Amino acid sequence: MTKEEYSLLEQYMLSCMGDSAHDKEHVYRVLYQALDIGKTEDNVNFDVLIAACLLHDIGRKEQFENPSLCHAMVGGDKAWDFLMANGFAPDFARQVKHCIQTHRYRKDNRPQSLEAKILFDADKLDVTGAMGIARTLIYKGIVSQPIYSLLPDGTVSDGQGDELPSFFQEYKYKLENLYGNFYTARARDMAGERQGAAVEFYNSLYREASASYGEGRLELDKQLV
């Protein structure tokens, strides 16, 4: 890929970014992580990989405005249109589109090409460890969802089995279960190195929230007559 082609793709990506949890820095981290993974694999088409990484979240705005839309599907279509309008080969555009449309965590639309699997892994790595915790909390704030919810007895729920959305619910439903779902050995190793930070943060936050409610409610009862 030429520097001019990279700049063209980068500028289009920048024009599409708006979500602070999925901002340009997320895109760059995914790209750099993908290049790291790519070095450990054979026969990687780095032009396809770079383009797919740069453009993988360009459909986020449409999904945010209309949650019934899938940003991966929208983004793949937008990438196809942009690449074709700017003189890229149809086969190249098809490969990039496939990578983007399969990067989201869905059982019915798995990545097939090596480049798609690397993008998938690089994107999921950014939801692991301390970075994943930080990004999830930012997103929960954007959509006005709480850190935790309460059980019927007034104690703090750990998120397991919760129907109401919260950070704890997201951790138990998604973040806690990411670490065995990578395609490449390099991504699995990187995720494993990060896992402890996420577990420690979640456990500490749950302990602090639970202690506050437990001790605080007892003290409140003493003060009320």
Image (tube, grey):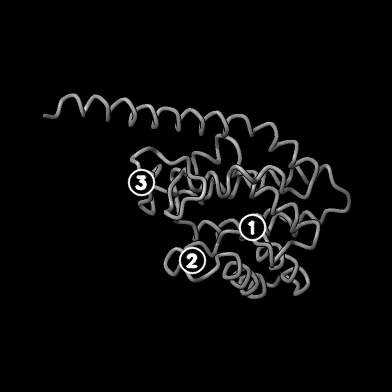
SS for callout 2: helix
Percent across and percent down for residue 92 are 76, 68
Residue at image point 27% right, 30% down: 217
Residue 23 x/y as whole percent:
50, 50
Q: How many marks?
A: 3
Q: CA distance from mark 3 to mark 1?
A: 32 Å
Given the image, on which type of amino acid does mark 2 rest?
Answer: Gln
Q: Earlier in the sequence, mark 2 or mark 1?
A: 2
Pointer 3 residue: 152
Q: CA distance from mark 2 to mark 3?
A: 33 Å
Tell me which label, 2 or 3, sits earlier in the chain: 2
Which mark identifies residue 63? 2
Which labelled disc corresponds to residue 105? 1
Instruction: Give the numbered dot on residue 64.
Output: none
- Residue 166, position in %: x, y? 43, 48
- The structure residue drawn at horizontal position 64% and vertical position 50%, both measured from the top left corner, is 123
